[in-house]
Image (cartoon, rainbow, N blue to C red):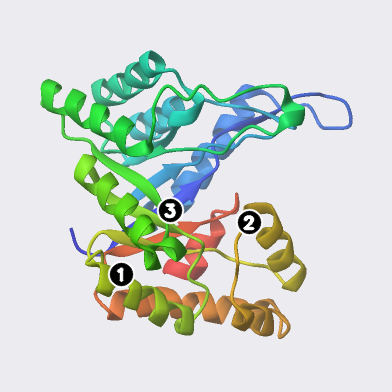
């Protein structure tokens, strides 16, 4: 397929409360979503519609958002479907709907545990993400559909036998590519990540991640929020300012291309203009 550019977009989000916020209508929110998608249409081979969970917003269905992008803009849009949040029946019906809509890709993710204070619990109908991918792939074969499944991987765990085994199990189950996190932050980290992929035989199947950071404070906040262990080189770069961070991220994109790796997975963090800056 060449160099696959997977660009993440936020789905349409609606304030869960009007208090303290400007009232936004459905039409206006959708118009903004389509405008954001159009701005990256020429830079993305797959638009990944992220699953965003926040008490501040009511989220539009990622499946419906992806279907609207396909219908209105004729683009390949992939909804993120979070396995741990769905019963087996709901998960398979969601995948079936995506297949019937002719979506080119779907991202099947495991998802996080709900925090104790939420007073909710995850469904856990599946023992692993690979099990849900396997059932989705079986459904796809029965329908003779052509959608391709994506799945996540923690690139830092690939240095361990268990981490590498989990990644390969997801591929054997039916995932075409694994989208990596934590991000590949600079050329030094790219060299390390590429080496891990080469040693594990996953070089052609893992798409490394580029995540645009704003400054040192943002780096530290993201590290805490996502539970990442980011390299010391990133902090040193962040101390030089946003321009230095951008140059490091741009260098990673160029490095991914020059090394013949399968693609780039770009988080836009809700700002699609990031794609133009980093991928054009």
- Gap in Å between the C-alphas at discs 2 and 1? 22 Å
- Gap in Å between the C-alphas at discs 3 and 2? 22 Å
- Is 241 placed left or right of 259 in the picture? right
The percent position of residue 201, horizontal first and vertical second, equals 22, 67
Is label 3 in a helix, a strand or a loop? strand
- Is 277 placed left or right of 167 in the picture? right
Q: List the residue tagged with mark 3.
A: 7
Quadrant in the picture for residue 2: bottom left
In this view of the protein, can residue 1 be seen by the observer? yes
Quadrant in the picture for residue 230: bottom right
**Residue at image coords 42%, 44%:** 48
Q: Are marks 3 and 2 in contact (CB under 8 Å)?
A: no
- Dot placed on the residue nearer the N-terminal end, 2 or 1: 1
Q: List the residue tagged with mark 2.
A: 227
**Residue at image coords 60%, 83%:** 233
- Dot placed on the residue nearer the N-terminal end, 3 or 1: 3
**Residue at image coords 46%, 65%:** 156
Which is more toward the observer, 72 or 244?
A: 244
In this view of the protein, can residue 45 be seen by the observer? no
Q: List the residue tagged with mark 1.
A: 197
Task: Give residue 181's mark.
Answer: none
- Gap in Å between the C-alphas at discs 3 and 1? 21 Å
Residue furthest front as drawn: 161
């Amino acid at each position: 397929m060449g160099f696959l550019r997977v660009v993440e977009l936020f789905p349409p989000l609606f304030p869960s409360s009007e208090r303290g916020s400007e009232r936004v209508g459905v039409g206006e929110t959708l118009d903004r979503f389509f405008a954001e998608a159009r701005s990256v249409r020429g830079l993305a081979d797959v638009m990944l519609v992220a699953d965003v969970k926040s008490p501040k917003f009511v989220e539009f269905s990622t499946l419906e958002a992806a279907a609207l992008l396909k219908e209105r803009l004729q683009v390949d849009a992939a909804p993120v479907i979070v396995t741990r949040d769905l019963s087996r029946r709901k998960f398979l019906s969601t995948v079936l709907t995506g297949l019937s809509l002719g979506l080119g890709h779907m991202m099947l993710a495991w998802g996080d545990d709900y925090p104790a204070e939420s007073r909710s619990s995850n469904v856990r109908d599946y023992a692993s993400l690979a099990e849900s991918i396997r059932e989705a792939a079986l459904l796809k074969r029965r329908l003779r559909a052509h959608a391709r499944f994506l799945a996540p991987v923690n690139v830092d765990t690939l240095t361990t036998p268990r981490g590498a085994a989990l990644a390969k199990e997801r591929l054997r189950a039916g995932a075409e590519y694994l989208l990596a996190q934590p991000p590949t932050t600079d050329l030094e980290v790219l060299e390390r990540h590429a080496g891990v992929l080469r040693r594990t035989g996953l070089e052609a199947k893992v798409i490394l991640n580029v995540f645009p950071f704003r400054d040192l404070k943002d780096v530290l906040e993201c590290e805490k929020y996502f539970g990442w262990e980011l390299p010391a080189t990133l902090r040193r770069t962040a101390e030089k300012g946003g321009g230095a961070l951008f140059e490091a991220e741009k260098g990673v994109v160029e490095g991914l291309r020059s090394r013949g790796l399968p693609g780039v997975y770009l988080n836009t963090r809700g700002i699609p203009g990031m794609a133009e800056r980093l991928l054009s």
